[in-house]
Amino acid sequence: MLFHPDIYFKDCEECRQFVMVDGEPHLTPEGKKIPRREGEQPNCKMCEKNNVPMLSERNWYTWEMYKRHKHFGLEPHERRDPLVQKHMIMIGEIDQAARMSVNPMMGLF
């Protein structure tokens, strides 16, 4: 999710409506998307979204809270909560490690 949000949030509807090749709509020579034949289903097992780890609803909420905390800080009641503190530290370490694996120089500044 950190590295491929475009895949994580990709809409399945386009895949249901159009023939896809390597995750992109197959185009006619004129550049138009080729619609699927009636009754033809996409092969969801081959979808690139299946290789992106999904978050549970609780974990998604915690990730969103971390992003808010990173930009705006914690609310006073959140600062006093030891579980919130623990989660923010853990997610911060994962976030930093993930970013450094993409660009090692990011951890230096």
Image (tube, grey):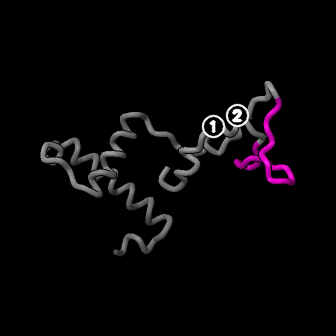
* Amino acid on which disc 2 is placed: Arg
Q: Which residue is mark 1?
A: 12
Which span of residues is magenta-colored?
20-37
For the residue labelled by badge 2, is the local secondary structure a helix, a strand or a loop? Answer: helix
In the picture as drawn, the residue positioned furthest to the right comes out as 29
Mark 1 burial class by Cα count in 10 Å: few <14, some 14-19, many 20+ = few
Identify the main secondary structure in magenta.
Answer: loop
* Amino acid on which disc 1 is placed: Cys
Residue 16, image quadrant: top right
* Image spot of residue 15 (x, y percent): 69, 38
For the residue labelled by badge 1, is the local secondary structure a helix, a strand or a loop? Answer: helix
Residue at 25% from the left image edge and 56% from the top image edge: 72
Residue 43, image quadrant: top right
Residue at 37% from the left image edge and 70% from the top image edge: 107
Disc assigned to residue 16? 2
Q: Are marks 1 and 2 in contact (CB under 8 Å)?
A: yes
Q: Is residue 22 left or right of residue 30?
A: left
Residue at 44% from the left image edge and 59% from the top image edge: 98
Q: Is residue 57 magenta?
A: no
Q: Is residue 24 magenta?
A: yes
